[in-house]
Image (cartoon, helix red, strand yellow):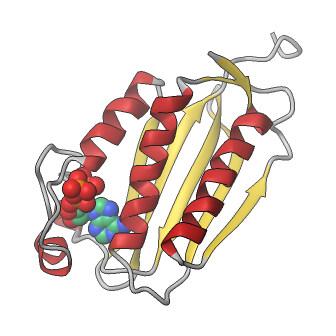
Amino acid sequence: TPMQAPELVQVLVDQAQSFATVSQRNIEVACDLADADACDVAVELDKLLQAWQIILDNAVKYSPPNSLIRVLIDVASEMNTTYVNVSVTDRGIGIKSDDIGRVTERNFRAQNARQARPDGLGIGLALAQTIVSQHQGRLRIESQVNQGTCVTLQLPTLRSSVDA
Ligand code: ATP
């Protein structure tokens, strides 16, 4: 279902802010929507919010309780496509570079994650990746061990009638 980018962003911000409250974590949210006005995004909102929750959950799970989590949402063009970029940056345990490519595999859990959180199944990000792909989007993961992780969800926008 097509949604205007600013409307979608507001829903994502609301979810991050409610999660900050329920998880009692400091989640700072910033948006740069200068170029968002004329953009629509085709989303299946239930599913997209499920992917968003998985990414937020991981940031909380894999970082210390008193550390800051930053959410940044912007709209930016790359080549011929304009993306809504939604990123979550934590200051947690991080992911070894050898493992980054595997974290969206079903049942894969890095050694440091198994130590920090013995009970996970390793399915959250596999599901998030599937959902994001269904939206023709991408998941980007950057990380450094013991420094933190940045997970970015990129959603392509539809060409607005003004640009067409
Ligand atoms: P579950 O699916 O039960 O929640 P999980 O958190 O291990 O378990 P995923 O969300 O699929 O599963 O994540 C897979 C792995 O990716 C994690 O086990 C961890 O190694 C790594 N990972 C994901 N997010 C982060 C993060 N923010 N910081 C550090 N490691 C992460």
Which quadrant holds the C terminus? Answer: top right
Where on the picture, by quarter, is residue 114? bottom left
Q: Is residue 29 above or below residue 33?
A: below
Q: Is residue 58 left or right of residue 20?
A: left
User: Residue at image x 60%, y 46%?
Assistant: 85
Residue 35 versus residue 55: which sits nearer the camera? 55
In x, y percent, where is residue 24? Answer: 53, 77
The residue shown at (85%, 26%) is: 38
Query: Where residue 33 sits in the image (x, y, percent)?
Result: 81, 47
Residue 143 visible to the viewer: no
For this orientation, the residue located farthest to the front is 22
Residue 127 visible = yes
Q: Position of residue 124 (x, y in %)?
A: 28, 48
Residue under the point 17% across and 61% down: 120
Ligand 1 visible in quadrant: bottom left
Quadrant of the image occupied by residue 155:
top right
The front one of 140 and 134 is 134
**Screen quadrant of the N terminus:** top right
Residue 41 against residue 93 in the figure, above or below? above
How many labels were placed on the picture? 0
Q: Nearer the viewer, residue 81 or 92?
A: 92
Q: Nearer the viewer, residue 91 or 80?
A: 91
Q: For this view, does 160 lie left or right of residue 58?
A: right
- Name the residue: 14% across, 55% down: 121
Q: Is 143 located above or below residue 91 in the figure?
A: above
Q: Position of residue 137 (x, y in %)?
A: 47, 31
